[in-house]
Image (spheres, helix red, strand yellow):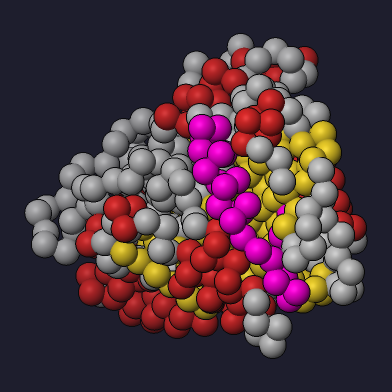
Amino acid sequence: MATMKSARKKSTEIVGTDSAGPKKWTTMFFLAGDNDLSDLIPSKMSGLERVTSKKSAGVLAQFDGRDGEAIQIHVNEIENEAPVGLGELNGGDIETLIAFAERARVKAPSQCRALVIWSHGTSVDPVESSARAQISRFRTPLRSLAKRANQAIVPPILRGTLFPTTTLRRLVTRKIGPDHTITADFTGPDKTSSDYLSNLELKDALARIDKQQRVNILGLEACLMNTIEVAYQFRGLVTCFLASQSSIPRKGWIYEAVLSSFQDVAASDEEVAASVVRAARYMKPSDERNVTLSALRMGKPIEAVEKAISKLADAMTTALEDPRQRDRIALAHHRAQAFAESETIDLVDFCRQLQKLVTASQIVVAAQEVETQVESLVLENVAHGISVARAHGVSISFPKRNYISPTYSDLDFAKKSSWVKFLSAYYDKVYPLAGQTQPQPPPSGTGARESRRNTPH
């Protein structure tokens, strides 16, 4: 095993050889830490180095830090070989992720695979976070002529998406309706390469990986990634999706606990995913405040939720013509469980607020249907802390201002559902002027917003 000192000096790969044939599971950890998370890489490495892989499961992990610190570790029951150098890697390039998954397929053959991606994340919300400001500094003229031209028309702080966009059209501010601008968000920034992975690119990467061998479980170990929009991107590509609705501690999950979930060879994909949610929450006692983690089923249940949301969106769009119903929808929006550093709300809690406040029967019935379908979608959910007590496993983007991510209209959910149409109509009625912020709602005991925040991941 490489020493920590040597691991920090060069790009390395630690390889072992399996002699007993394919295992049941290989867990792939892709740690995109070439940013301000780089200082945590040694502790993340140490956690995996303490793991002794069992015959039923293998581990391949790639750590990408600053200054060329890319390290890959293969853990199994056979003694590991000497480290092999990989060179500088761009963690924001899908080719890096695809190559990593292929090496895992060859070096750690198994029947099933799980992929965990650790980095910053902001789902699809427009909030100006420290990570977004970081991406602004990373964007240099080196990427392409189009992006150099884009820098001349995009605001100084580039609002970023889950992982790196690659085309000019994804970066230019667009509109979803009259005066309703939408801006970008991101996760997984790579400082050295001035790059990051977008939700669209991650879907493309998984589709290409799937041609060689399927990823059964996808876990995004980053803040705010468990939204219906993000999860819907990966339907048909993975069996289960794991992520947090809230911000998570910078150190993330304890991998020793996570890997214990992959030892039962008789367990199904869903059983393993549910076990990971239960195990991963035990990060550290001091970090167990106001954090969430949930697993979603990525088959028919997520398609059913999209259809139910579209019916709800259509019903609310029609009801916006009635000022009384419009005000009640706005109040439900305000009272729904929200998350720090985000413009997302809990989908189930929003539906429950609608059922309490709105009198239009079409909305009430549609909200009940969404809640029913989400119950089938959410496989396992954990929420610790009073400020996330009404988190039920999946969020939806609903900004309290008149814009959302610029890549939002490119997402599969936005294309398929009626949600964007509703947002545009809602902003037309509630925010008649571009840039107008929503007024504070009346004091309410059920409308308390999150006050205590974890350090954004």
Marks counted in the figure total 0
Q: Residue at x 62, y 36 (%)?
A: 4
Q: Nearer the viewer, residue 194 or 374?
A: 194
x and y percentages locating residue 377 in the rendered image:
53, 76
x and y percentages locating residue 2 in the rendered image:
71, 40
x and y percentages locating residue 383 in the rendered image:
35, 66
Q: Is residue 216 left or right of residue 376?
A: right
The quadrant in which residue 220 appears is bottom right
The answer to whether one can see residue 402 in this image is: no
Q: Is residue 341 left or right of residue 17?
A: left
Residue 296 inside the magenta-drawn segment: no
Q: Residue at x 75, y 62 (%)?
A: 76
Q: Nearer the viewer, residue 272 or 304?
A: 272
* Residue lying at the far bottom of the rendered structure: 266
Q: Nearer the viewer, residue 231 or 223?
A: 223
The range drawn in magenta is 37-60
Q: Quadrant of the C terminus?
A: top left
Q: Is residue 288 left or right of residue 159?
A: left
Q: Is residue 94 left or right of residue 127?
A: right
Q: Is residue 447 above or below residue 273?
A: above
Q: Residue at x 41, y 50 (%)?
A: 248
x and y percentages locating residue 152 in the rendered image:
61, 11
Q: Residue at x 56, y 39 (%)?
A: 42
The answer to whether one can see residue 138 in this image is: yes
Residue 54 inside the magenta-drawn segment: yes
Q: Nearer the viewer, residue 1 or 270?
A: 1
The quadrant in which residue 306 appears is bottom right
Q: Is residue 409 above or below residue 384?
A: above
